[in-house]
Image (tube, helix red, strand yellow):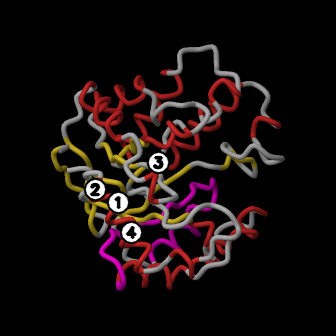
Amino acid sequence: MLTDYHVHLRPDGDDTPASRYFTSANAEHYREVAASRGVQELGVAEHVHRFTAALDVWQHPFWRQSAVDDLDRYVEFVREETDLKLGLEADYIRGRDGKMGALLEKHDWDYVVGSVHFLGDHAVDFDDETDIWRYEMTPERVWTRYFEALAESATCGLFDIISHPDLVKIWGKGRPAPEKDLRYFYEPAVEAMLEGGVAMEVSTAGLRKPVGEIYPSRSFLEMAVDAGIPIALSSDAHVPEQLAFRYEDAVKLLEEVGVKELAVFEKRQRRLEPIG
């Protein structure tokens, strides 16, 4: 069994309307590419900020700019016009748990992917005026804030999978790293995932980013595996060509750290299936 759950049917950007990408033909193309690469379990998890309903949760300028689509229509499309698993990539925003929970409970998801993209109003993975590194100048402070938020996301009860769990490293050598052993930051996050009963995502998306490595780092993954945290495998694809991106590297890493099963979801129920 190979999975790809963290998948977007359309690219990022303003000129990518749902009408062009939320089509049966596009979904079938994704399915065909995924099957050709050995993926049996394929699901879609569009960004929550692309939907107008997200503005009931948060009014960040980026969300106001991005929120143009109808969440009900997205759910209807996936359920009635495709055979994809239905998911959503929902941001963890401190203090907005109740509002995000109200949004999520309106639909019958197969899984919800939880992400930490923002620390307060500042972004972890945007190289623009919102970049957290422009406001928090020490790497220790940035990493501490990021992993505190990640731990909160794991225990808030909203999510099934914690995605790209060390996204803070996205810029690689383009941002300074903390001087202390990085396991100092990883350990509380692992404990929180164990407490929250969530799966950790292993994502090959980092191989397409400046950092050039899988999320999470090997040492972070080893700690999670030792703790018994279930693993979900995804590519964070935004175009069909990115589906199962460099899965050979991911499968090799998983084998080396002793992962023999992957988390599979249906109606927010998790089971484990052998990697194959």
| Mark toward the viewer: 1 or 3 | 1
CA neighbours of label 1 inside 10 A, class few (<14), some (14 to 19), many (20+): some
For disc 3, the marked residue is: 163
Amino acid on which disc 3 is placed: Ser
Q: Are marks 4 and 1 in contact (CB under 8 Å)?
A: yes
User: Gap between marks 4 and 1, in whole Å?
Assistant: 6 Å
The residue at which mark 2 appears reads as 36
What is the CA distance from the residue labelled 4 to the residue labelled 2? 11 Å
Q: How far separated are the C-alphas under marks 1 and 3?
A: 22 Å
Q: Tag 2, which secondary structure?
A: helix
| Amino acid at circle 1 | Val
Residue 16 found in image quarter? bottom right
Which residue position holds label 1? 33
Look at the image and give the residue range highlighted in magenta. 80-105
Mark 3 vs mark 4: give the one in front.
Answer: 4
* Residues at marks 3 and 4, CA–CA distance in whole angstroms: 24 Å
Residue 35: image location, x then y, percent:
27, 59
Q: Quadrant of residue 70?
A: bottom right
Q: Is residue 143 above or below residue 64?
A: above
